[in-house]
Image (cartoon, grey):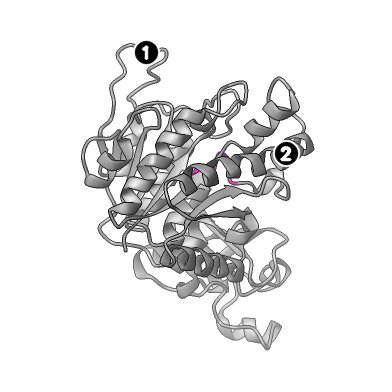
Amino acid sequence: MPVAVVKLGSSIVAEDSGALRLSVVARICEEVAALHAAGVDVVIVTSGAIARGIHLLGLGGRPKVFEELQAASAVGQGRLYRTYDTYLRERGIQSAQVLLTFFDMSARTHYLNARRTLRKLVDWRIVPVINENDTTTTDEISFGDNDFLAAQVAVLVDASLLLLLTSTAGLYTADPRSDPEAELVTSVSDPAELAALSISSETSALGSGGMRSKVAAAEMATAAGIPTVIGSGFEPGVMARAWAGEPAGTHFAPHPVRQPSFKLWLRYAKPSQGSVEVDAGAARALRDGGTSLLPVGIVGVEGAFEAGDAIEVVTDGRAVGKGISNYSAAELRRVMGLKSKAVREVLPRATEEAVHRDYFVLV
């Protein structure tokens, strides 16, 4: 069956005070039920646990200290999920709470396990209600306002649509709150079209994302062949219109050639632990020839990565791509610039490729 992934930002789920917008959540669950009844499986990715905890604890605003945010999330997450579960059960739908961390996406075995679990829930026609596990994540490896998480989930379940619900009608040519001339961008066929736009990273009082993170999520999902819509969670019927391909905000067209799942994971989910600088010839071979990266083309190494870590490949300060290194940083420093025969003399058990082409993706 087709699958739609629907993401709700904090501004949709909760007031600035942290109080839940119960009527909005109830209406969205009603729209989820309508799609479900029409044969569309739905996955919900929701923010709002921290906002809910802030309200329940009477904190008066979003804490600045990270462990306070985690504690607020621990208080709010159960109450938030209970609200979804109640509204969905009233409409005859079974739900499941799923909490994910960035590590679940960045470690390949965890990533595949999460995919199997989510796909089984969808096969059983259960609606997963997903949030980041804020109580165990760290500031350096968090998803942000769940936009990236929603895009990852859309890839995991092979979704037919990603719908990012926010407090505005979509992406505008400028900030509509300060520029009365701002116009809604109804469709985006190529991310390059966005270069001339002023895309804000500003968030709500309790949010942590902003429109820029939604555009990045749309770029990721469309690279996987998944059409994406940024629309207003306050507009009744937006879900049905987006699914039907009717005007519902800003529509991002899927790329005509879908990237393999592994390369999407490598590009967007696995964090880089260092980088290597390559010469112009190696950069050209990687870009145009689809070759592997050999030590002879490397002229510099940054970081303290190990074999099996992801690394950035750059030339003249510009990114070429990202790949899985077959060498540690220390080993690469010993053999960079050497031809394959000389590499084998220094490291007899080394493989020929520093990064194999099957484990490399252009950026």
* Residue at image location 63% in from the left, 54% down from the top: 101
Q: Position of residue 139 (x, y in %)?
A: 70, 43
Q: Position of residue 171 (x, y in %)?
A: 35, 30
- Dividing the picture into quadrants, the one containing residue 362 is bottom left
The relative height of residue 341 versus residue 104 in the rendered view (above or below) is below
Q: Position of residue 161 (x, y in %)?
A: 33, 51
The residue that label 1 is drawn on is: 179
The disc at residue 75 is 2
Please, what secondary structure does the residue beneath circle 1 have?
loop
Distance from disc 1 to disc 2, alpha carbons, whole Å, reads 38 Å
- Dividing the picture into quadrants, the one containing residue 40 is bottom left
Please, what secondary structure does the residue beneath circle 2 have?
helix
Tell me: 349 left or right of 194: right
Q: Is residue 237 magenta?
A: no
First along the sequence among labels 1 and 2: 2
- In the picture, the quarter occupied by the C terminus is bottom left
In this rendering, the count of numbered labels is 2
Viewer-side label of 1, 2: 2
* Residue at image location 69% in from the left, 83% down from the top: 347
* Foreground pick, 296 / 161: 161
Q: Position of residue 123 (x, y in %)?
A: 42, 67
The residues colored magenta run: 143-147
* Foreground pick, 82 / 16: 82
Residue 7 shows up from this direction:
yes
Is the magenta region chiefly helix, strand or loop? Answer: loop
| Three-letter amino acid code of the residue under disc 1 | Asp
| Disc 2 packing (10 Å; few <14; some 14–19; many ≥20) | many
Tell me: 269 left or right of 177: right
Residue 292 shows up from this direction:
no
